[in-house]
Image (cartoon, helix red, strand yellow):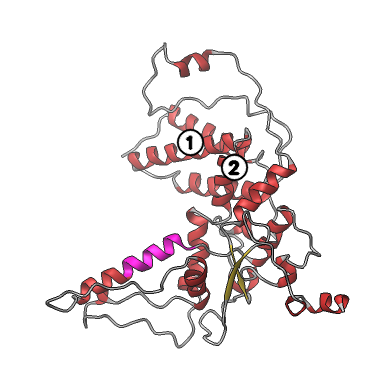
Amino acid sequence: MFKPTSQHSFYVRALYKRILSEAGYFFDDRSRAYVVNRARKFFKEYKSCQDESRIKSKLTEAKKRLHRLESANKGNQKSALKVLEAAYGRTGKVKHKLMHSYLYEHFPADFKKPAPLIPHIPHTAPPPPLCYPLQAIVTQHLKKQLEPQLPVPPFKPLHRGRQANLLWKWRSMLIQQMEIPLPFEIICELELKAGASMTHPCYSGMLNMGGPRWIDMYAGHENDPDLAHLCPIQQQTPLKKLETNRCIPLPPSPYTKSPSIYATSTLIAMSPLSTISRYQYAPREMRRLYRRLLNKIPLISPLPDAMSLYDANIKYQVSQSQWATNTITHILDLKHLPPNLQKDEC
């Protein structure tokens, strides 16, 4: 049984405080809330863990996340984009939670899962069909087929068990590469941060394009630590201005070997402390980061909701934000404009 020592407890508390402190200096409000919520969740979850190897791996992972956050706060745009991608569901747990609502939560009453290819052997059942918004993302945004091209053996039919394995392997690949749209309110917010105006004809709020509204798809997830930061009405973590705790170095981990007295890291640790100043991102740099983030977010029209995911009469169109990088400027006809703008043009 793992028994935490005083050195272990001191290191965990110091790491937790540094993550919360460093998260408060990141420029994006929803990313700050994401980092704080995730840190609180994991440190509480592993507070009573008795597996020493798992504790060591989680501490190493938390330290890597802290270094990435520190690098982003020092002006490294690559690290800043990684933090934004994790917070807005392009990678990691947030992406899985966004996708979970499409895959498992909102089945219609008459939905039936496919029967096993080999009777009485449940694990040979093929994957269930994707909902129509995800099918549109696969075919239009991902540019892939919904079903794989199965091999044809020359001398005997393909084994049913192998057929099911190939179908599930293709489905796993699609889910891994698929980009899930964010809630409609968050997409509008990102476009405004990327330089859009609320009266622009190509603004998603005017065209009514993007993802599902929060209340139509994610109602009930307001207290989920992985999705609460994307709730439009959620109170966000304020940006810190006082830099009092950032000059305190993180103590060495009790699970690492003591470095040599001639190592560079030891010489740096022996040097006097210097105040770490927060890098001030210019508005142009922030717009560029948000545009690079929008490049990975598909827009769906019409807006999907939980009741129409499996409605075959709705034809979904997938496009990209006008404010994403390397996008083609759209020339809208009068018929594509909202009704209020059509009257103004006439």
Residue 172 is inside the magenta segment: yes
Query: Disc 2 marks which amino acid?
Result: Ala
Q: Secondary structure at mark 2?
A: helix
Q: Position of residue 80 (x, y in %)?
A: 59, 42
- The residue at 38%/19% (across/down) is 258
* Above/below status of 328 relative to 157: above
- The residue at 31%/76% (across/down) is 126
Q: Position of residue 282 (x, y in %)?
A: 73, 39
Is label 2 in contact with label 1 (beta carbons under 8 Å)? no
Query: Disc 1 marks which amino acid?
Result: Lys
Q: Residue furthest left?
A: 155
**Horizontally, is 1 left or right of 83 in the view?**
left
Q: Could you give the CA–CA distance between mark 2 and mark 1, rounded to whole angstroms?
A: 16 Å
Q: Which mark is residue 63?
A: 1
Q: Residues within 10 Å of mark 2 (few under 14, many from 20)?
A: many
Say which residue label 2 marks. 80
Q: Where, quadrant-wise, is the N terminus in this rendering?
A: top left
Q: Where, quadrant-wise, is the C terminus in this rendering?
A: bottom right
In magenta, the rendered stretch is 168-178
Name the one closer to the observer, 43 or 69: 69
* Above/below status of 93 relative to 42: below
Q: Residue furthest top?
A: 262
Name the one closer to the observer, 116 or 41: 116
**Horizontally, is 285 left or right of 256 in the view?**
right
Residue 219 visible, this orientation: no
The secondary structure that dominates the magenta segment is: helix
Q: Position of residue 71 (x, y in %)?
A: 57, 34
- The residue at 62%/48% (across/down) is 31
